[in-house]
Image (cartoon, grey):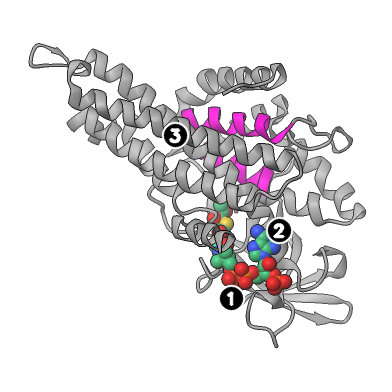
Amino acid sequence: MLLTDDQKSIQQLARDFAVSEVQPVAKALEQDHSILCQLWKKMADLGFTGIQFPEAYGGLDSDSVSYLLVIEELAKASASVAVTLSVHTTVGILPIFNFGNEAQKQKYLPPLISGEKIAAFGLTEPNAGSDAGSGLTKAEPANGHYVLNGSKIFITNAHIADIFVTTARTNKEKADAKGLSAFILEKGMPGFKVEEADEKLGIQGSDWGTLVFEDVQVAKEHLLGDPEQGFKIFMNSLDAGRISIGAMALGIAEACLADSLKYAKERKQFGQPIANFQAIQFKLADMAVEIEAARHLVYHAARLKDAGRLFSKEASMAKLWASETAMRAANQAVQIFGGYGYTKDFPVERYFRDAKSTELVEGTSQIQRLVIARHLL
Ligand code: CAA
């Protein structure tokens, strides 16, 4: 992939950080979330928490490709670290950056971009997953403010975040996406609680939780964008988020290939390295081709975004292909490692669990196909 000198520099910075700081703790991170907070501070110092945002708000003013290179490098070492940063910088910050008024931007963007504060994104509800427009959380107007009641589940960064963008129904006459508005909430607002979520299969080093709203009084200044435009604000933000999850999947797939190549050259069976066998070589070749295609799709979508072109379809294509590539690559990596791949002594079992998440978060593979098909039709 042809990169500019600036992009190569940030890629190298992220690679050095991932190899020296993230990889050694990637396994321990699954049990000890305090490590994530230590890594977060270091990533903030390196500017990773605001790469693609203007210097005026404290960002590095780089392009989307530079940002995605960081996500990819982090994901090679730990998908949990990558998803934490991805949710913060795309679906967490972007709704405020793209749709906030100047007062909201001045208040929220500098501490989020510097990494002093962390962002989360509240869309999914117990009854509203793929059908994200059917959420029941409501925000009723009362004496110049809104009163929020409801809950949001599977929220990445829930316990560690300070700022939350969330949807709530402000028009109960409209039961679909059209009745939703977007709000900016802050940790500690009376009636706003974060509860423990179920244990998850993969990305175990990342945080998630349930947001509970019980008569949370929210001033009108916290409304994000125009009333009843919340769904579109969230869909717009998810377009960018999906490229980022694509880059995360790409990183996982690359880690699968790198570990498989190394192991296949070292592991001897029938008197020779298993890399000598065509059965293994064909797996490696297929992984490499699929990864190359994923890389092109991810960076193509990012370049369209940077050029100010429509990129919704390409974002879904990138996420769909990269996430399914990661899942296939992880499956093959475990197969190449054989019984050892099924143990926790090697990271391929973690790649396998982490890869699955990329087929689910920010829209399942089926939703990506639906979005692509709607564009085609
Ligand atoms: N950008 C801007 N507007 C958009 C849009 C986009 N990408 N996609 C749709 N819209 C607009 C439509 O134009 C339409 O506007 P009008 O009413 O003016 O015509 C409106 O939004 C409603 O659109 P649809 O009729 O297409 O809505 P729908 O109900 O059929 O849903 C969907 C479409 C694609 C299925 C959508 O619900 C969807 O993406 N579902 C998946 C949700 C998802 O990705 N959830 C992940 C949550 S985040 C997460 O994973 C957790 C985490 O922390 C990482």
Of tags 1 and 2, the one toward the viewer is: 1
Q: Which mark is residue 252?
A: 3
Is residue 112 one of those drawn in magenta?
A: no
Q: Is residue 119 left or right of residue 291?
A: right
Is residue 76 one of those drawn in magenta?
A: yes
Q: Residue at x 51, y 56 (%)?
A: 368
Residue that label 1 marks = 134
Badge 1 amino acid: Ser
Q: Residue at x 72, y 19 (%)?
A: 6
Of tags 3 and 2, the one toward the viewer is: 3
Q: Which residues are magenta?
A: 63-90
Residue that label 2 marks = 165
- Asked if the residue at label 1 sits under 8 Å from ligand 1, the reply is yes
| Frontmost residue, 31 versus 260 | 260
Residue 258, compared with residue 325, is above or below; it is above
Residue 165, compared with residue 268, is above or below; it is below
Q: Position of residue 49 (x, y in %)?
A: 70, 35
**N-terminal of the two: label 1 or label 2?**
1
For label 2, the SS is: strand
Badge 2 amino acid: Val
- Asked if the residue at label 2 sits under 8 Å from ligand 1, the reply is no
Q: Position of residue 238 (x, y in %)?
A: 63, 54
